[in-house]
Amino acid sequence: MTGSNVNSTQPITFVTFYMDVTDQTMASIHQTTSTITVTEPHQYIQTMFASARRFHPDCRAVVLSDGDTYFPPCADIEIIRYELDPQQPMLSRSIAWLAYLRAARGHTVFLDSDLLINGDLSHVFAEDFAAALTYRDGDSKWPINAGINFAQGDDLEAAAAFHEIWLREFRAAHLKQSVWGGDQDTLRELFTAVDFARQDSFNWRLGDIDIRFLPCARYNFSTAKAHKMDGYYPDALVLHFKGKRKPYMFPYWRKHIRDKSVRN
């Protein structure tokens, strides 16, 4: 694929993952992190997609889930269900991503439901890559945050090949972290040779697959203080209200995105 053949103008599909988990599984998650909650999951999902439509009005909205999780009827959100294990939510998410890509068409953005799109992302797809990930300088445990990642619509076969490698290594090395964190542990190990002490966008070859890295500061922004995210962040195109930042997501949407003019 060459730059002249990249089509950044085709519609984007925004894809999130959600399935109900048992109290036992949530307790296992809390052994790793105490900041994860599932309060009002449907409202988070709907708000996240609404933010995507502010800047991409022609986008498609898809939720990946298992066969049992309930979603309220919503005409503009498509639900795709797979056979998944609710006791292994992070592994199940990786399985669902790969299954989706194997049948996908067009540009795809996988993203958590506690994200807000805060600007036009079309330009991301003007670059040559199969998959794009977001990275953060200074985080040795998880330098790559899997909360958002991109699949180039003009190279979906290679994007699926990357996700297949990711899933295979996840299962091989981090199956004990299938409830939480194993996906990001796997990414760290797949890209140990990459120096993330930088703040720009760049490409890296994983075998014969082009991977693009985007700085979290612009494409997956969270505040340094986990308990506070009540500022105004116009320079970040994607805002991640993860963990204890979740209470600030709806106020930001109402104040800074929902009723504001669309920025290009």
Image: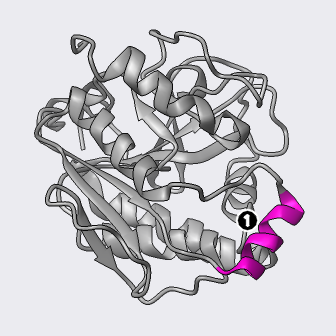
At x 12%, y 33%, the residue is 9
At x 70%, y 43%, the residue is 243
Which residue matches tag 1?
A: 180
Vertical placement of 19 versus 55: above or below? below
Span highlighted in magenta in the image:
22-32
The percent coordinates of residue 147 (x first, y second) are: 55, 47
Vertical placement of 109 versus 195: above or below? below
The kind of residue tagged 1 is Trp
Within the image, what quadrant is residue 77 found in?
bottom left
Could you tell whether 178 is left or right of 93 in the image? right
Vertical placement of 90 versus 112: above or below? below
Within the image, what quadrant is residue 119 found in?
top left
- Asked which secondary structure carries label 1, the reply is loop
Q: Please identify the quadrant where the N terminus is shown.
A: top left
* Depth order, front residue of 205/186: 186
Q: Please identify the quadrant where the C terminus is shown.
A: top left
At x 23%, y 26%, the residue is 55
Q: How is the image coloured?
A: one colour
From the image, give the main secondary structure of the stretch colored magenta. helix
At x 64%, y 40%, the residue is 242
Residue, far right: 31
